Amino acid sequence: MKEADITIQKDSESVKFPFESGPIRREYGNLIHEYTTEGFWEIKGEEKTFWPACDYPKTKKGFIRAGEDFFWVETEGKGTTLLLIHGGPGVDHRYFHPNLSLLASKRSLIYYDLRGHYMSPESTHRLTHGIMQDAKDIENLRKALGVDYIDLLGHSYGGHVALLYALNYPDNVGNLVLCGVPLGETDEEINRRIESHPISKKMEKAKSSEKRKKLYYQFYYHKPLSKENLYYNKLVQLAYKTEKNQRLLRAYDDDPFNTDLAKKISDLHKSLLVIVGKYDPITCIEAIENTIAGARCSRLAVCEESGHEPFVDEPDKFSGLVNDFLDGL
């Protein structure tokens, strides 16, 4: 397996760790996956499908060995380490491109696919997928990166993973940014709000896939997507069609994760920034305000022209909020 050194900034000094290029092979019953930096083959009997790796031109890419497992990692920028945790489960990091590159002028950005998601291989020892394992994986990634602590930015489900990691490994976390993360509500309350949303009802009645796609974008975003945002968003949606993703989602269905994690937020002793879009159908601003009121050094920022992904709807405002917060302003 070929290796190539990349450099990550650790405060004022640089540390190096190797990217590995594969091949990496995983077998589950009659399903085989073969991974390289070009992408992965999904083989089921006589059927063989190739799924290409992320093609974002600004990042260095490869597999990182973290503990006993491999994770697909991309990096760009210089400065203190900021780990970016995507939402889901079932999607991958690509919808962060290109907008989060605005943070790379001051930080070493680390994008990665969660365990078993798209370019990150499944584990060899059949670990259970779920939020507890996802949080443990961050700790293994931190060790692989060779940094004493990391700042975290988690979006949607990834925000819950970031929060759990910060609660379980407080000495290894610098600052915490949560974006589009529902807090202070039960799963039933969140689902009821989503289901009662006017656009959700329209999607149920839509008779064509083209109409449903149009409504999907209206549901999650407040503004039309740029050509580049639309490109990476469509790639992420394609990931749902992989055989491995169907297996993955079934595993997460068995995970006992719920939003009660937010009840422990008062135990958090780290600086916390919560960013939410005014038009985000997934979150409730009032519930978030009440939830973080008991947390130390916490602040809430509402993006007035954003939906579920403020870094897409208002990229300049979003990056300004994050940079000012992490710079201690």
Image (cartoon, rainbow, N blue to C red):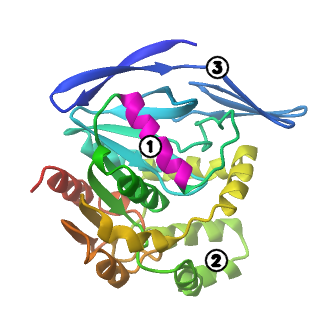
Quarter placement of the N terminus:
top right
Marks 3 and 1, how far apart at CA: 23 Å
Magenta span: chief secondary structure: helix
> Which is nearer the eye, 138 or 314?
138
Name the amino acid type tagged 2. Answer: Met
Q: Give the vertical position of 279 relative to 99 (above or below).
A: below
Q: How many numbered circles does the render carry?
A: 3
Residue stretch rendered in magenta on the structure: 132-145
Q: Which residue is mark 2?
A: 203
- Report crowding for label 2: few under 14, some 14 to 19, many 20 or more residues within 10 A (C-alpha): some
- Report crowding for label 3: few under 14, some 14 to 19, many 20 or more residues within 10 A (C-alpha): some
Q: Give the vertical position of 271 relative to 125 (above or below).
A: below
Where's residue 126, x and y in %?
70, 40
Badge number at residue 250: none
> Which is nearer the eye, 72 or 202?
72
Which residue is depicted at the point 69% across and 61% down?
A: 254
Q: Look at the image and say whether residue 191 sits in the magenta stretch.
A: no
Which residue is depicted at the point 64% across and 47% down?
A: 239
Secondary structure beneath dot 1 equals: helix
Quarter placement of the C terminus:
bottom left
Marks 1 and 2, how far apart at CA: 36 Å
Residue 223: quadrant of the picture: bottom left
Q: Which residue is mark 1?
A: 138
Marks 3 and 2, how far apart at CA: 41 Å
Q: Which residue is mark 3?
A: 23
Name the amino acid type tagged 1. Answer: Ile
Secondary structure beneath dot 2 equals: helix
Q: Is residue 1 visible?
A: yes
